Image (cartoon, rainbow, N blue to C red):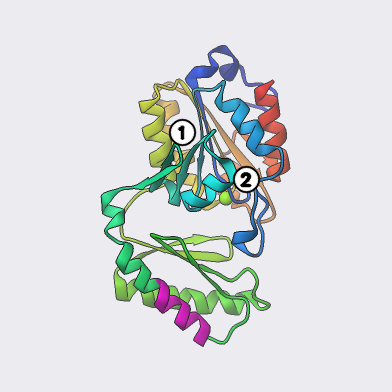
């Protein structure tokens, strides 16, 4: 499907669902993750679309708390890749994930102490509640910082039986549970009785959502995989995309086209 041709969306809009990543998709990538904001114009556009489509959901590695501040209650919000959900402003997580909170708090403290002792400027340890983010985008020598933070992540993962997930100039330590953005897409498409679904994303963490759309397409649903291009987009994501847009500005134009 090409931009400007969304026939599937116009027939029965309330049977279509739109899922979107946040960082790099609705927000420009910034050096300090806490400085990110959705592009002006995007939250109202999503709110407008959520009144017309069956579902509009932001599915992000961010915490649900952050997403709630940026998007309010007008759209469905899934944080930590779908492990957290905000319903009417109330955030909930699965019992299994909640059971990891004390361990992750301990790992966070250790990560902060050890990152500091590396003596490298520009490292950041992020408290994500049920995950720990290790960032080095602000480091002057990113290659050196990446190596040091990867070693740190290896140590902590081994010591505490955690898993690692890569990001852009970042790594995450997560509880050893399997879940992804693809699970949200599959589960919500089924529970909302959707006949069409689109996902908009820019990074590796969005590939499981593309996988989910491929499965749904195999089951007869109409799907659109939208890849957001930036200098850092993984080639696989752009290769698999049905539609490619340029940065959050391109996403906003695509959303406006979708809304007609
Ligand atoms: Mg992203």
Residue 72's place in the image compared with 165, above or below, is above
Question: Residue 216's spot in the image, x, y percent?
Answer: 42, 29
Label 2 packing within 10 angstroms: few (<14), some (14-19), many (20+): many
Question: Residue 179's spot in the image, x, y percent?
Answer: 36, 48
Q: Is residue 181 left or right of residue 160?
A: right
Toward the viewer: 249 or 100? 100
Residue at disc 1, CB closer than 8 Å to ligand 1: no
The total number of labels drawn is: 2
Q: Residue at x 32, y 62 (%)?
A: 101
Res. 201 in view: no
Q: Which residue is mark 2?
A: 25
Q: Which mark is residue 213?
A: 1
Residue range (magenta): 108-117
Q: Is residue 41 magenta?
A: no
Q: Label 1 to label 2, Cα distance in Å?
A: 18 Å
Question: Residue 197's spot in the image, x, y percent?
Answer: 50, 28
- Magenta stretch, main secondary structure class: helix
**Quadrant in the rendering for residue 187:** top left
Say which element carries label 1. Answer: helix
Residue 203's place in the image compared with 191, above or below, is below
């Amino acid at each position: 499907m090409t931009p400007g041709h969304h026939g599937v969306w116009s027939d029965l809009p309330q049977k279509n669902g739109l899922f979107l990543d946040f960082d790099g998709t609705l927000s420009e990538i910034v050096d300090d993750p806490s400085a990110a904001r959705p592009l002006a114009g995007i939250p109202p556009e999503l709110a407008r679309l959520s009144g017309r489509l069956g579902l509009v959901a932001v599915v992000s590695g961010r915490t649900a708390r952050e997403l709630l501040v940026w998007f309010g209650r007008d759209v469905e919000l899934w944080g930590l890749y779908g492990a957290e959900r905000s319903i009417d402003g109330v955030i909930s997580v699965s019992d299994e994930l909640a059971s990891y909170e004390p361990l992750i708090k301990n790992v966070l403290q250790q990560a902060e102490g050890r990152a500091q002792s590396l003596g490298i400027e520009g490292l950041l340890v992020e408290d994500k509640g049920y995950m720990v983010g290790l960032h080095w985008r602000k480091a002057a020598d990113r290659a050196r910082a990446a190596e040091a933070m990867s070693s740190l992540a290896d140590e902590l993962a081994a010591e505490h039986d955690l898993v690692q997930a890569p990001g852009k100039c970042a790594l995450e330590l997560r509880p050893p549970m399997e879940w992804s953005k693809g699970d949200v897409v599959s589960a919500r498409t089924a529970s909302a009785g959707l006949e069409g679904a689109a996902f908009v994303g820019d990074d590796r963490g969005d590939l499981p959502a593309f996988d989910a759309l491929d499965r749904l397409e195999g089951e007869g649903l109409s799907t659109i995989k939208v890849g957001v291009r930036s200098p850092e987009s993984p080639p696989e994501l752009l290769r698999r995309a049905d539609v490619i847009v340029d940065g959050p500005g391109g996403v906003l134009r695509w959303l406006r086209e979708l809304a007609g």
